[in-house]
Amino acid sequence: MTAEETVNYINQSLDMGLASSMPTDENSYNNSFETRMLKDGILIIPRMPAGYMIDNDFYQKAFKVLSTALYPQYTLLKQPSIYLVPIKTSDIHTQRGLFFPMKKGIPKRLIIPDLKKFVKNYHKNAIPLMQDLSISYDKISSIAVSGNTGSGKSFLITYFLEFMKSLSDSFPESRAEPDSYMVVVDPKMDEPSRWARENGVKVIYPASNRSKSDFVSEVNTELSKGLNLIHERQRILFDHPNSTFRTKVIVIDELASLNQVNSSVKNSFQSLLNQITLLGRQTRVLTLLASQQFDHTVLNTSTRDQASVRVQLGDINRRTTQYLFPDLDPSGIVIPIGKGTGLIQVIDDEHPYQVQPILSPTYYYREGKVL
């Protein structure tokens, strides 16, 4: 389709899809609004004054129409609220427009034949997540991954672990400190524990002869070491602001189970984790947190808000997204079908803050398929 044909198609879709929200005499045929296709989105310019309310409700309804109508040619990026932009014109009737950011095509999953070889040969300072999406190590400090059982959460965590280990090992002084700069906490003794054991990474898991409070106390000791490292590096940066550090990686799976202990141990755990996520970015202390959900009993709001990468896998609805994406109504987002799919938001100075669909990488080890 040409650009003109696409605009005509969009106008027809909006006229029909929004018929219940607009008076019958308000449509593109009557010049009530104008549609423009831009390189990075769609612009709907209403002619004011209008006989219909131009508010967030109208914006979200238009999103639902456009998201479905343009699939799979384009993927619209969902906004939590109306996205109003100024238009350069002297005509006051058309000086504002509704902007709908979009990406050409649909998300495409990475297929990796040999994960370890892929990580070894991937020389960019980033973690690739899809064919058109990667996240930079230098721009993130905390990753939160949520998903119900069977959603592919553990496999995505293992994928992150491979890249994070490579990041930590690539530092010039890494051979002198073989495992002290990466630790995995795994209450279930599942995939992350096995990965850590196979890769010589320190792992903390419950022992059969210890109470849960003892286990969480051991975790707190490790978090305390991480916080002390942050403070030490802050003092170095104060005198030498251009200093570089080897990345310290703290991974905690099934976060909810660590809060089922007595209040003093739990409060210490939450406090330490909050300080690390708050201060970790500049001092290169990175956290990866995973849980089936991130409500206030699992993670306090302050810690959750520090997550610069947020991933929700599995069933997507207002109930499952209310913690990682509290202002988001996911209706209208076209979610791909399959394991390891859901939503992602990257909050840094490179990516726009929009929430978009994600298809987690499919990767293989030499002995067979992992995901």
Image (tube, grey):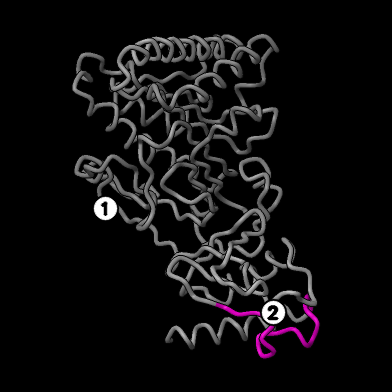
Residue 99 placement, left or right of 197: right
**Residue at image x 54%, y 53%?**
354
Q: Which mark is residue 113?
A: 1
Magenta highlight range: 20-35
Q: Residues within 10 Å of mark 1 (few under 14, many from 20)?
A: some
Say whether marks 2 and 1 touch (CB < 8 Å): no
The amino acid type found where label 2 is placed reads: Gly
Above or below, 95 against 246 in this view is below
- In which quadrant will I find the N terminus? bottom left
Where residue 55 appears, as percent x and y from the top left, is: 74, 63
Image position, residue 300 (x, y; %): 65, 27
Q: Nearer the viewer, residue 271 or 253?
A: 271
Query: Mark 2 packing: few (<14 Cα in 10 Å), some, or many (20+)?
Result: some
Q: Is residue 371 part of the magenta span, yes or no?
A: no
Q: Position of residue 353 (x, y in %)?
A: 52, 49
User: Looking at numbered disc 1 in the image, what kind of residue is underneath it?
Assistant: Pro
Q: Residue at x 55, y 15 (%)?
A: 272
For marks 2 and 1, the one nearer the N-term is 2
Q: Mark number for residue 17?
A: 2
Q: CA distance from mark 2 to mark 1?
A: 43 Å
Give the residue drawn at x 39%, y 25%.
Answer: 249
Q: Is residue 27 within the magenta segment?
A: yes
Identify the residue shown where x is 53% and y is 65%: 76
